Amino acid sequence: MKNFDFLKKKNIAFIVSAVLLVAGLLSFVIAGFNMGVDFTGGSKITMHMDKDPSKDLDAVEKYVKDIVGEDKFVSLVQSTTNKKDIIVTIKSVTSFDTLVIKEIASLYGIDVKTIGDKETTADDKGNEYAYVSFELNAEPTVKEDDLKAKLNALDKENEVFKSVNVEKNVVTVNYYSTSVEEKIIAKVNDDEKFEVVSDEISTISKNRASAQTKTALISAAVAIVLMLVYITFRFKQIASGLASVACLFFNLFMMFTFYAVFQWEMTLDIIPACLTILGYSINATIVIFDRIRENNVKEADFDAAANSGVHSTMLRSVNTTITTLITIILVYILGVTSIKAFALPLIIGIIAGLFSSVFLAAPIWSVLRKWFKVEEKAAAKKQAKAK
């Protein structure tokens, strides 16, 4: 690499980058992203078992899929910290209240609104039932038995609906109120091979998930804008700021490409990972830009100064990246699930950062200098001062 001219052969790096970007865009369109419940809404159910359940995890997965369906099932894993724990993740499941409203509205072809709050009561076996009343804008013509049959069809296996009462234009529905999460726990516990000692349910609503997605996008955008301002101010050129931001965009884009291609689940850990990648990558770019600026004082030709600057800092960039990667890879191998979710995007982002800072940063800066006619403007200022 000693004789490689990064500036004269910049088209090679640009072509490789373009191919990677196009491949990424195609993966986004074709495969999309496997968004976790942190961004889509859903629940994480931790079941603490009386013994190691590793041999029967397939059975538990089947129970979950039978209750929520294939499309709502996200994952089922055995905890790495406690082998007796099973962690089930499912997407948001439409509440029975919503299903009932939709079914009644569809059946009668009218608008439906709920009267008052949902009330719950328990039968002699301890099963909880909910009572919800709906007001119709006209007296129903469908018989109670027909309506009950329609509502029971929403959940045949569990026979969730107990009774339906129709008085004039008010329909009161009495149904089994156990949540989907509780149904999963009860179903697993009913199997003689399992005994759920205790459980924990963590639910993220769709509204909260949307807010977290918005926060992630705003955080990344603010970080990039502030870096653009800082680099532009430090090197006194908008070209340098835009070049650094282009490299940051490339690094994040490559990380998301891997997530789309391999369909890795995107969790909330990706937010701090993205910000860490931005901070690490900009540091490597600044080191190179500093050396280029120093060389440019000695050499009149910017491209020659840039090529020399990349060569003089490349060993430092490679060594720093390798030592950082060794640490993060060990963290990924030895860490728990949550740590792995943070370390994985870092590995991809840091490798992409090495490529962008060495092969893209200086060439992009050079191209942008020509676009903004930096040399011509500098010469004009000198002439003006001379006069």
Image: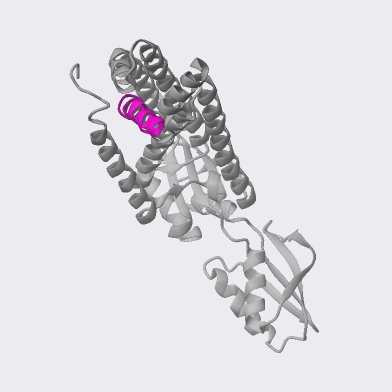
Q: Position of residue 380 (x, y in %)?
A: 46, 25
> In this orientation, which residue lies closer to the viewer: 194 or 373?
373
Looking at the image, residue 224 sits to the left or right of residue 296; the answer is right
Q: Position of residue 344 (x, y in %)?
A: 39, 32
Position of 283 relative to 89 (above/below): above
Task: Using the rendered view, name the quadrant where residue 299 is placed.
Answer: top left
Q: Position of residue 314 (x, y in %)?
A: 30, 17
Looking at the image, residue 194 sits to the left or right of residue 354; the answer is right
Q: Look at 55% across and 52% down and name the residue there.
A: 186
Position of 198 relative to 379 (above/below): below
Q: Look at 36% across and 53% down and name the residue there.
A: 31
Looking at the image, residue 366 sits to the left or right of residue 234; the answer is left
Q: Position of residue 333 (x, y in %)?
A: 35, 26
Q: Look at 51% across and 54% down and name the residue there.
A: 187
Q: Can the viewer see residue 192? A: no
Task: State whether the magenta stretch is mostly helix, strand or loop.
Answer: helix
Q: Which residues are magenta?
A: 354-370
> In this orientation, which residue lies closer to the viewer: 224 or 53?
224
Q: Give the position of the N terminus as an image quadrant.
A: top left
> In this orientation, which residue lies closer to the viewer: 232 or 182?
232
Looking at the image, residue 16 sits to the left or right of residue 367; the answer is left
Residue 235 drawn in magenta: no
Q: Can the viewer see residue 366? A: yes
Task: Using the rendered view, name the quadrant where residue 296 is placed.
Answer: top left
Q: Residue furthest left?
A: 3
